[in-house]
Amino acid sequence: MAFIYDLLLSWSGVLSSIAPIISLMLITAGGIVYGLAQTQPSEVKGKWQTAAIGLVIGGLIVGAVWGSATAIRDNAAKLLT
Amino acid sequence: MAGLEAQSINALSLSLSGTPGSTIPMPAGFEAAFAAILITILAGGIAFGIGLALRSRRLSGFGKEELLASVINAALFGAFFGMIALINGVYLDYSSSYAASGSSVFSNCTVASALVSNMSSTPLAPVFASCEYSLGAMSLQQAAQSLLSSQMALGYLAGISVNLPGASISPFAGFDSAASTLSKSLDAIYAFFAAASLYSSALGAFSSLAMSIGFPAGFLLRAFYPTRRLGSLLLALSFASISIMPLCALASAQSVDTAIYKSGQLVEASKSFNDYAAPALAADPNDTGFFSTVRSTFSSGQLTSAANALASAAWSLASYCALAFAILPLISAILSLAFALALAGALDLEGLSSVYKYS
């Protein structure tokens, strides 16, 4: 069981490491796309801006879940007690 | 990360104890399941975020569902300790109401389960239930031993024949029917002894397996999407084996108590028969006083009464054992299995997928 526990800890370590990177990448990509949207003709600018906002919101959600994952789990564990 | 995880587990253990200063350590093997919940929260959050970013309803729906399933899993994990406390409370209430009644099951097995009451997060009802059927098996074993000696005596007496000039008399030939009843009863009592021993072992083994493997593996497997159904089934089976099965055994403790009482009656009847039969059994057939010994034993009529009482007690015990050690455990096993399957279906949360319909 200790082997499984160590394996799971390493998995959660990997996910905890890549989550902020993904978050930053999405937010940065969202910013770049939003900037590029300004250079586009008006008939397609809206689509570019929507995609950019989606990227930023996705990045924010990944960051928020990463930051609060332990708190979510610990508080959820007390929901029914 | 490992340090943070350990702190988090300690914090949960502290909060679950309820009383400051006394901590309930998380049982061995449960840390992995708790770590798995963190993984699914992170994975669900990442999938949800990327799904939103890439405008993939399939990925974002999957992430949302995994997040929700992780929260439910964590809530179930936390409630696990509460459920054990609840079952222990039911057991303690029930046993305390019968403790003063002089019942041998409650007086012996309450002490046995009190020995583990200081061990945290240990379900007490399975300890009691295993002890209850173990006591029942022991009493049946004693009854069977007494009955065997009486049956041998009865067989010997039934075969005694006294040769007189011109005639041969078998004074105890009428014991044949009693011997036949005893033989059938003895077979039945041995079978019920085996059933009681098996059920006692099963109660103890299922409870130990549930606590050491079933629950940790169930929570672990339930955390991940592909193994959620298997994890739910394991959790449900484990919960049934520490709750429904032992609580059914607790509810049938009165019948086991009666079986133990009837076993005692049978042992007494057997002793009484053996006492009355002792002079005839001890007499030497080649001795000149053998005929007078046999005649006095037979003519008193007490041996015949004792043999009939013994046969009646043996048949009564064998009949009652069918209820206490076969029918009630069978009902308990069927109820537990039905409960486990229903609970597995409920924990499976198939309805959750249909709510989102992301695919």
Image (tube, rainbow, N blue to C red):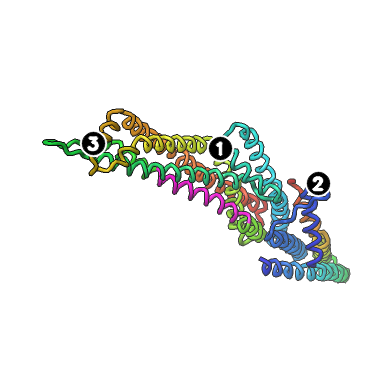
Q: Image quadrant for the C terminus of chain B? A: bottom right
Q: Chain of mark 3?
A: B
- CB under 8 Å between discs 1 and 3: no
Q: CA distance from mark 2 to mark 1?
A: 35 Å
User: In the visual, does B52 lie left or right of B89?
Assistant: right
| Residue type (three-letter) at the residue carrying disc 2 | Thr
CA distance for labels 1 and 3: 45 Å
- Disc 3 marks a residue whose amino acid type is Phe
The residue singled out by tag 1 in the image is B104
Q: Residue at x 64, y 48 (%)?
A: B123
The answer to whether dots 2 and 1 both sit on one chain is yes
Stretch of the chain drawn in magenta: B189-211
Which of marks 1 and 2 precedes in the sequence? 2
**Counting other residues with Cα less than 10 Å from the Cα at mark 2, is it few (<14), some (14-19), or many (20 or more)?**
few
Of B143 and B19, nearer the camera is B143
Seen at 69% across and 45% down, the residue is B85
The residue where tag 2 is placed is B19
User: Judging from the image, what secondary structure is the residue with disc 2 in?
Assistant: loop
